[in-house]
Amino acid sequence: MKNSTKIILIFILFLLILSGIYLYLFSNLFLVKPFSLQDKKEIKFNESFEISFNHTINPNFYKQNITLEPKTGMKAIINKERNKIILTPETFWKENTEYKITLPKGRTKKFLPVKEASFSFKTSTQPKVVSISPENGGKDVVLSMENPIVVNFDKSTEDFFVDFVIS
């Protein structure tokens, strides 16, 4: 083989390697898209919001660059596999509030591009009392095992504390 043929082959090989690197780093073929099963759903006051990735992410970048509207104190925890961000409120999410989470563009640990993403969720409302038996102002009310005080709510009180004051 002549030297000029070798140089042309090396140059072509070099271009193929560069185009492969370009495709790997900048093409949408390898774009990582974050996702959440809780997106656009209602969550409870004390529930965490999880964002998943199908590749390992850079934890320091995402911990510092997540935005939450309305601004609320939260902790961004990244699992040990580094493929999930868990957002937990410092106290509780506010009742009946819509939140929006924005993740900026980023890179995985293997330098794959991560698409910018937005998620939203709404917090649930507290249960409301629908009826009480015996009714307020009732006279000659007997309270016993057979005649207890019955309070009906509009939804389950499973994850809430219910405080009764009898006066």
Image: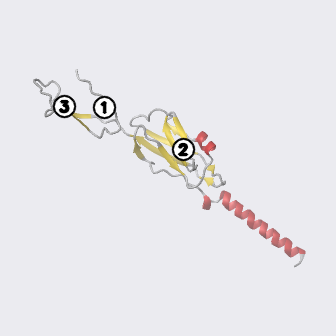
Residue 54 placement, left or right of 7? left
- In contact (CB < 8 Å): disc 3 and disc 2: no
Mark 1 vs mark 2, CA separation in Å:
35 Å
Q: State which tag comes first along the sequence, 1 or 3.
A: 3
Q: Secondary structure at mark 1?
A: loop
Q: Amino acid at mark 1?
A: Val
Tell me the kind of residue under disc 3.
Ile
Q: Which residue is mark 2?
A: 102
Badge nearest the viewer, 3 or 2: 3
From the top left corner, tell me how far across and down residue 126 is, in percent. Answer: 34, 35
Q: Name the mark on residue 98.
A: none
| Residue picked out by circle 1 | 162
For marks 3 and 2, give the CA distance. Answer: 47 Å
Name the residue beneath numbered marker 3.
Answer: 149
Amino acid at the residue labelled 2: Thr
Query: Which quadrant: the C terminus?
Result: top left
Q: CA distance from mark 1 to mark 3?
A: 14 Å
Residue 28: x and y, percent? Answer: 61, 59
**Left or right position of 97 against 22:** left
Secondary structure under tag 3 reads: loop
